[in-house]
Image (cartoon, rainbow, N blue to C red):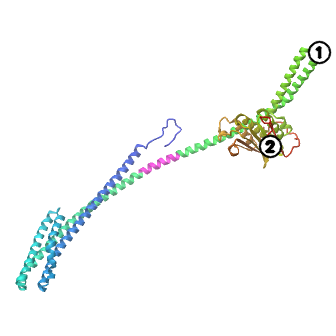
Amino acid sequence: MYFSADPAFRPVRSLPWYQTLLCAVCVLILVLNGVSLVGNLDGLKAANARQAQADRESSRLQYVNLLVTDADSGLRGYFLSGSETYLGPLRTAQRELDGQFETLKTLLADDPSQLKNLAQLQTLVRRRIGLMGEALEVYRHGGLQDIVAIARSQEDQVRMDEIRLQVVVMTGEQNEALATGGAAFYDQYRRTALIGIGIDAAAIVVLLLFYNLIWRGFSLRLSAERALQQSNDQLETVVAERTEQLSVLSRHLIRVSEEEKARLARELHDEMGANLTAIGMYLSSVGEQLKDSQPEQAAALGCARATLLETVQLKRRIVEDLRPSLLDNMGLAAALQSYCEDFARATRLDCEALVELEADSAGTMQAIALFRIAQESLNNVAKYAQARHVVVHLAREGAGLALEVSDDGVGIPPDAMRRPKSHGLLGMRERALLLGGTLKVERGVNGVGTCVQAWVPLEAPAAGPGDAVSGAPAQPVLAMSPLMRVQHPAADGRTRS
């Protein structure tokens, strides 16, 4: 079956008619060859049967001749010696000859000429056996002289010669019939062999034609497979290029997003913060001036100032979400600990942060990437995990930093990274890949909960133009212990160590 990009192309679901015809002709030729072989075997079997029957007929005729000859020799021995022992062959001949002639009649039933010869032979043998009996009686009553007189007439010798001649004639006719049958079988076998050779030649020609068709089909299929493989390779190349382009675009968007967040955070902190502070000072001054003369307006200004303070707190939260000030001012360890504390208060979950001192050796790009991965992981825990306890662990591992966020919730499906709407997980992975790191999301220990493992090198890969993430450089951090462990209040107000 071949495939084509042409919409009008329809796959072939059966062999072409000429290939089917060739198969049928080849089968027919093989059947004819089999029939010919069976016929040849039948002919060979018939020839063997004729040969066996001829051998049996010849052996019976020779046995009849032998019985008569032995009887005659035994009788002569009796005449010379007078011993009854020499009469054994005569008695045997008298006893067995009738049975032998009946057997010969059965064997020669299909040959009238041989039956006629057999009747003549039977007459001669019976006459000769009868004469032997008469000679025996003459010997017993008259003596040897009468027998000698009978023998001088040479009648006995003539009758024996007639019997032998009749046996020779019958044997000759049998051999002639056998030779004729053999010649006929040879002609039939020769014709069958020639027909078999012709059938084999035709079968070879058909097989060669069929092989040629198969080879052509195989060549076409091989060419189609090669073309399909080339198309697949091209598609894979295009897909790889598009995937790389999308990955580059995703990382670029992450960088641009961080730059924009940092810029907005600075503007909100610097310009908007200064303006809000100035407005607060003006409101306080005017309120003091109107406190005595117009207390109602002063109270209204006090409410406005309270609203302004709430706006300042809102601005502060927005700035912290856009770009945590602790991350730039005190380092990654303090920022993670502070965020874990805020997360525990907001979600009423037991959140434990284990951060080593070497975490603060991370650069700006590594620090913001690890912080965002931890932030997204904790957000996923709050939304989907149904967990009671979360552990955030950040430590030095080889030439980079390893972050692990694990919970005791319901766990994550194995195909979560491949789902089309897993934007948060894909974003975490792209952040790690942006710095030459890795990210794994899998089940927790013993299949309980979810474990997010991220690793980024301390030295960022060579960046092209525009790859740097804007933001204030990291400031010196406060002195901390090599391993900082913070405890946060759980939902019931107790502290879990």
- Neighbourhood count class around disc 2 (C-alpha, 10 Å): few under 14, some 14–19, many 20 upward: some
Q: Mark 1 points at which residue?
A: 292
Determine if the magenta segment contains residue 154: no
Residue 208 is situated, as x and y percent measured from the top left of the image, at 42, 52
Dominant secondary structure of the residues highlighted in magenta in the image = helix
Residue 171 or residue 393, whichever sits in front:
393
Q: Quadrant of residue 295?
A: top right
Give the image quarter of residue 118: bottom left
Q: Give the range drawn in magenta.
A: 209-223
- Image position of 89 (left or right of 355): left
Q: What's under tag 1, amino acid-wise? A: Asp
Mark 1 neighbour density, 10 Å: few (under 14) some (14–19) many (20 or more): few
Task: Give amino acid for label 2.
Answer: Leu
| Quadrant that contains the C terminus | top right
Q: In this view, does 425 lie to the left or right of 109?
A: right
Instruction: Give the percent coordinates (x, y) of residue 334.
Output: 84, 39
Q: Which of marks 1 and 2 is nearer the N terminus?
A: 1
Q: In this view, does 124 lie to the left or right of 268?
A: left
